[in-house]
Amino acid sequence: MTTRRIPVVLVTGFLGSGKTTMLNHLLRGSVDTRIGVIVNDFGSINIDAMAVAGQVDSMIPIENGCLCCAADSTEMDEMLARLTEPSLGIEVIVIEASGLAEPQSMIRTLLSSENEHILYGGLIEVVDAAEFENTRERHPELDRHVRAADAVVLNKADRVSEQERARVLETLARIAPGAPVVTAEHGRVDPGFLFDRGPGAPGGERYRQLSFAEVCTDEHDWHEHLHHAYQSVEFTADRPLDPRRFLEFLDGRPAGLYRMKGFIHFAAPGHDRKFALHAVGSYLRFHPSEWAPGEARMTQLVMIGAGVDAEALTKELTDCVAAAPETIADQHMMGILRYVQERTDELDTDEPDVEEPVPADASHTD
Ligand SMILES: Nc1nc2c(ncn2[C@@H]2O[C@H](COP(=O)(O)OP(=O)(O)OP(=O)(O)O)[C@@H](O)[C@H]2O)c(=O)[nH]1
């Protein structure tokens, strides 16, 4: 008897490109499919796993480093063994890589897995339409990441003009001619794009043959892994933060601090909500939600950047803890509220405004 093998789909993309947002959208839109998820976060507090928890049949968080650096596939095999346990009935496994992971290494780790219940299901690279060109300048390695993808999601289309979007599409076509590209806002792609790309479907075969260059070992590029240039700093506080001080901190955050994410507890009357914070480059948003019943009110923050002074950051944040919460007034939240966005990505349950993927060079004019 042959057993059906479970496809394992890799989701990669630079820091803050929208991987978790897309994953959450896909999980909400795939209630009839049993999905297992592995979420790898660079920092030691797995904010992404917290964002995904509750929507998924089985989830394994891995924090503090990149899964792409596992010396062998043992760690991956252990996780896959848990998720392919027949009693779970998992039909698809999605691995959300950290924003600094090396896609090719992840593919190799997966291909060298000894788990006979799985099948490599392809790699989706999420690209931030607004940040891509700048990020490429700093990290030319990103081109390699795009080339490793079976499909590219050009996310955050709402943050760019038509012309900028066309420019990024042209760049993608140059980097990876023929790769299917789907444009999205808030990660709203059709779940079928990820889970059901059988032969003849847009974007082509799900299981393509990998080239020798993709599969062979790459000792030479280990040192080029993006995360060698980055460090993560974590901050937690049991006592609430002073909103004005915290805003000052955000306004003056160092240029090298590219990514911040976490949850903030503010000491302001009438604002006892859980403020999810996301900063990606100069982009900054708070997404408030209610605390879960019994959830400890606290601040948990992960900051990822290059050349940042961890000690100084921690000191500045410690100074944001409200010394006298009772003196903080409602209007002290004004500055924070300017950056509040109610979660549009959570309101998109059934009618996603999705696009069919087009080959990247379809928009290429020369
Ligand atoms: N305007 C806009 N914001 C988006 C879009 N997609 C995601 N975001 C926001 O971008 C921020 C980062 O999104 P995430 O999904 O956490 O990104 P990520 O790739 O998982 O981040 P890392 O795991 O840290 O690399 C969040 O504030 C999202 O709400 C989009 O299409 N448009």
Image (cartoon, rainbow, N blue to C red):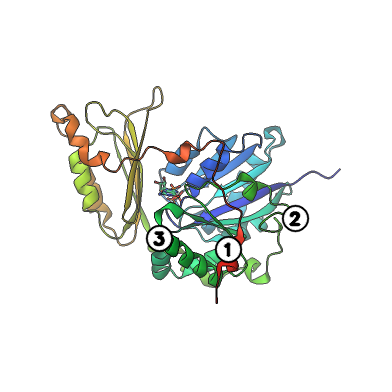
- Residue 69 point in image, percent of width and height: 52, 58
Disc ID at residue 104: 1
Residue 354 image position (x, y, % from top left): 56, 48
What residue appears at the point 65 percent right and 66 percent down from the top-left corner?
215
Q: Amino acid at mark 3?
A: Glu
Q: Residues within 10 Å of mark 3 (few under 14, many from 20)?
A: many
Between label 3 and label 1, give the one nearer the viewer: 3
Packing grade of label 2 (10 A; few <14, some 14-19, many >=20) is few
Mark 2: C-beta under 8 Å from nearest atom of ligand 1:
no
Q: Which residue is more in the foreground, 333 or 43?
A: 333
**Labels 3 & 2 near each other (Cβ < 8 A):** no
Type of residue at label 2? Pro
Locate the C terminus and report the quarter of the image it occupies. bottom right
Question: Residue most toward the right?
Answer: 1
- Where residue 266 appears, x then y in whole percent? 25, 34
Question: Mark 2 = which residue?
Answer: 199
Q: Where, by quadrant of the figure, is residue 34 drawn?
A: top right
Where does the N terminus fall, quadrant-wise?
A: top right
Task: Residue 245: give x, y in percent of width and height.
Answer: 18, 42
Is 335 placed left or right of 56 in the picture? left
Q: Work out whether residue 7 can be spotted.
A: yes
Dot 1 alpha-carbon crowd within 10 angstroms: few under 14, some 14 to 19, many 20 or more:
many
